[in-house]
Amino acid sequence: MKNIQIIDGAANATFSVFQATEGEFVTIFPDGRDIELIEDLIERLGEQAAGSVLTTLWRRPILKRDALGIHGTLFFDNEHRRDHIPPSKREVDWDDNSVNQAQRDLFAKYR
């Protein structure tokens, strides 16, 4: 199972984590991505297919303390962040000015 953290615009700021099967994960995050915007997911899959994959995801919450890693981040209500997210939608491709030196060194190993 892969863990997906949900970042949304809700005032409660829970940023919950849900578990996805390998197939669900690849559907949400194709081509080696680990970042996705809900608007792009819906555009890519269609509203019905996106809703179907998310419906099963919502049935598998996991406590943050029990999650062994975060494998992907799905943004809801964050269209305003689009210009800050790497075009590749891969964490390792953040602009060097957006992260500290230790992160730059780490990400360089995975580019």
Image: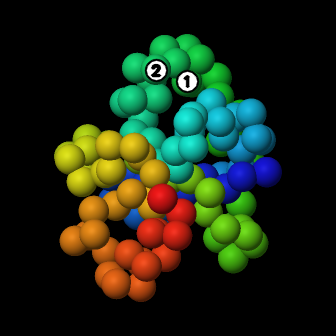
Q: Residue at x 42, y 46 (%)?
A: 89
- In this view, the mark in front (1 or 2): 2
Give coordinates of residue 46: x percent, y percent.
Answer: 49, 14
Give the crowd class for mark 2: few <14, some 14-19, many >=20 residues within 10 Å: few
Say which quarter of the image contains residue 82. top left
Give coordinates of residue 63: x percent, y percent.
Answer: 69, 67
Report whether residue 29 is seen.
yes
Taking depth in this image into account, of 108 and 7 the one nearest to the observer is 108
Q: Any mark on residue 44, and which?
A: 2
Q: Is residue 47 above or below residue 56?
A: above
Q: Is residue 83 above or below residue 53?
A: below
Give coordinates of residue 102: x percent, y percent.
Answer: 41, 85
Give coordinates of residue 99: x percent, y percent.
Answer: 31, 74
Taking depth in this image into account, of 74 and 87 the one nearest to the observer is 87
- How many tags in the picture? 2
Q: Label 1, secondary structure: give it.
A: helix
Q: Is residue 111 left or right of residue 101?
A: right
* Residue topped by disc 1: 50
Taking depth in this image into account, of 85 and 53 the one nearest to the observer is 85
Q: Amino acid at mark 2?
A: Arg
Q: Is residue 23 above or below residue 69?
A: above
Q: Are marks 1 and 2 in contact (CB under 8 Å)?
A: yes
Say which quarter of the image contains residue 30. top right
Report whether residue 6 is seen.
no
Q: Is residue 72 left or right of residue 88?
A: right
Q: Residue at x 38, y 75 (%)?
A: 104
Q: Is residue 103 left or right of residue 52?
A: left
Q: Label 2, secondary structure: give it.
A: helix
Q: Residue at x 53, y 63 (%)?
A: 110
